[in-house]
Amino acid sequence: MQILLFSLMALVIVVCCIGVVATKNPVRAALMLVSNFIALAVLYVMLFAQFVAAAQVIVYAGAIMVLFVFTIMLLNLSGDTPLSSPGSLRTPFVVGLGSMMFVVITLGVFRYFSNAASVSQDTTNNVGTVETVGKFLFTKWVYPFELTSILLLVAVIGAVVMAKRRID
C-alpha cells in the first residue's frame, strides 16, 4: 500500500512540475505548484514527519502561493510579452542561480555524508517532531538553511527582473 501511494504521489509531483514549466498561463502554473506542494506534504506524512507536512501545507501551499497568485494578478502577466530583450540580465541571472544551486546541493550532500554515521537511534525515532526539527535546523543545519534563504532571495529578485516590463 505504501509503495502504491508513494508511486502515485511521485507521479503527481512529476506531472505537476512539468505542468508548472510547460503551461503558459501563470495562474494555472501556480495551481499546479500548489498541487505539487500538497503531494509533497503527503510524502512527508508517509515519512512520519507530520510537523514538516503541516508546515509545507500552511506555509507553502497557503501563504506563499497566495502571495504568488496576488503578484501574478497585480502584475497582470500575459503570455504574449517576452521575458528577455537584447541586453537583459537573463544570462547572468541563470549563471548566478545555477551556481548558488550547485553550492547549496554540494554542501547538503557533503553534510549528509559527513553526518550520516553520527545519527543516533533516538534521533531516527523522533524525526518528525517539532523538537527534533528545531534542534537540527538551528544547530547542525543552520548554514544550509541560511544558504537556502539566500537562494530564495536571489530567485525572487530574478523573478522580479524577468517580469519587469521595459518601458520605452
Image (cartoon, rainbow, N blue to C red):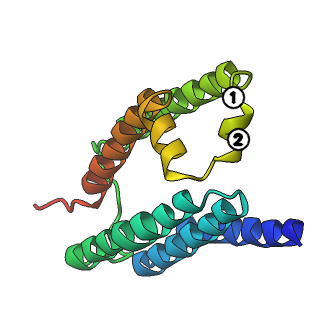
- Above or below 125: residue 17: below
Q: Is residue 96 left or right of residue 29?
A: left
Residue 167 seen in this snapshot = yes
Three-letter residue code for mark 1: Val
For label 1, the SS is loop
Which mark, by number, is residue 124?
Answer: 2
Three-letter residue code for mark 2: Thr
Which comes before the other along the chain, label 2 or label 1?
1
Residue 28 x, y percent position in the rendering = 48, 80
- Above or below 62: residue 150: above
Question: Between 78 and 63, which is closer to the camera in this rendering?
Answer: 63
Residue 19 x, y percent position in the rendering = 60, 72
Q: Is residue 107 left or right of residue 58?
A: right
For label 2, the SS is helix
Crowding at mark 1 (Cα within 10 Å: few <14, some 14-19, many 20+)? few
**Which quadrant: the N terminus?**
bottom right
Whether label 2 touches label 1, CB < 8 Å: yes
Q: Residue furthest front?
A: 122
Quarter of the view holding residue 97:
top left
Residue 22 seen in this snapshot = no
Q: Which residue is mark 1?
A: 119
| Distance of label 2 from label 1 (alpha carbons) | 7 Å
